[in-house]
């Protein structure tokens, strides 16, 4: 029963649960980005480029394989159905765009978190409470009008100077 207890303690740690939540949210975010690329970005891009559907672009490595009726393979679905070896470079282009969008979103997220952390750690400089006597170089109170060491008269400290 020691292993079960150890596993339970491990699984219930805050950072393990946070990681699990992050993975689940990341998977859902990945689906959203894939839909954004496939359904929103690529159709207009394909239209601008002459009606190209990037997702179905491929290079047939088995030109000798044909469809059952003897006609040549024209689509990625036909190539997969016929069992032809293909390089599906259109899917690869879609995946690169997916990756770039996710990487950019993560970059923006990390940048925002770092900015918040910097603001959290930045504290205003403490107000100066002492100054140096110009005659004997002793540290004296910023409010002092006379040096306690050499008894020289000191000009009042100007605010903001």
Image: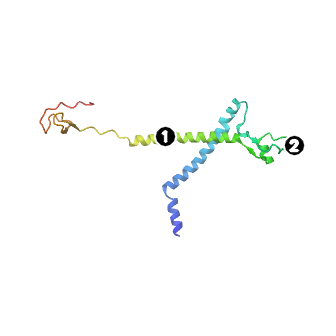
Colour pattern of the rendering: rainbow
Query: Which residue, given by chain and number where applicable, does mark 2 sit on?
Result: 70
Tag 2's secondary structure? loop
Q: Is residue 34 left or right of residue 120?
A: right
Q: Position of residue 51 (x, y in %)?
A: 73, 32
Q: Nearer the viewer, residue 100 or 33?
A: 100
SS of the residue under disc 1 = helix
Q: Earlier in the sequence, mark 2 or mark 1?
A: 2
Q: Residues within 10 Å of mark 1 (few under 14, many from 20)?
A: few
Residues packed near mark 2 inside 10 Å, few (<14), some (14 to 19) or many (20 plus): few
Which of the 4 image quarters holds residue 72?
A: top right
Q: Which mark is residue 111?
A: 1
At x 58%, y 50%, the residue is 24
Q: Most extreme residue toward the right, as rendered?
A: 69
Query: What percent of the width, then of the height, locates residue 81?
Result: 79, 47
Q: Residue at x 21, y 32 (%)?
A: 157
Total marks in image: 2
Q: Quadrant of residue 95?
A: top right
Name the side, left or right, on which 83 lies relative to 28: right
How far apart marks 2 and 1 lie (CA) works out to 56 Å
Please identify the quadrant where the C terminus is shown: top left
């Amino acid at each position: 029963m020691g292993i079960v207890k150890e596993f339970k303690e491990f699984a219930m740690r805050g950072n393990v649960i946070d990681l699990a939540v992050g993975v689940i949210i990341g998977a859902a975010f990945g689906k959203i980005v894939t839909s954004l690329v496939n359904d929103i970005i690529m159709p207009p891009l394909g239209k601008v480029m002459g009606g190209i559907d990037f997702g179905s672009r491929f290079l047939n490595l088995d030109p000798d394989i044909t469809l059952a009726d003897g006609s040549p393979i024209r689509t990625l679905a036909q190539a997969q159905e016929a069992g032809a070896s293909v390089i599906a470079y259109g899917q690869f282009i879609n995946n690169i765009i997916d990756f770039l969008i996710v990487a950019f979103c993560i970059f923006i997220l990390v940048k925002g978190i770092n900015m918040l952390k910097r603001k959290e750690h930045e504290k205003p400089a403490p107000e100066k409470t002492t100054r140096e006597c110009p005659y004997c170089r002793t540290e004296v109170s910023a409010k002092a009008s006379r040096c306690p060491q050499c008894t020289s008269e000191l000009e009042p400290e100007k605010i903001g100077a």
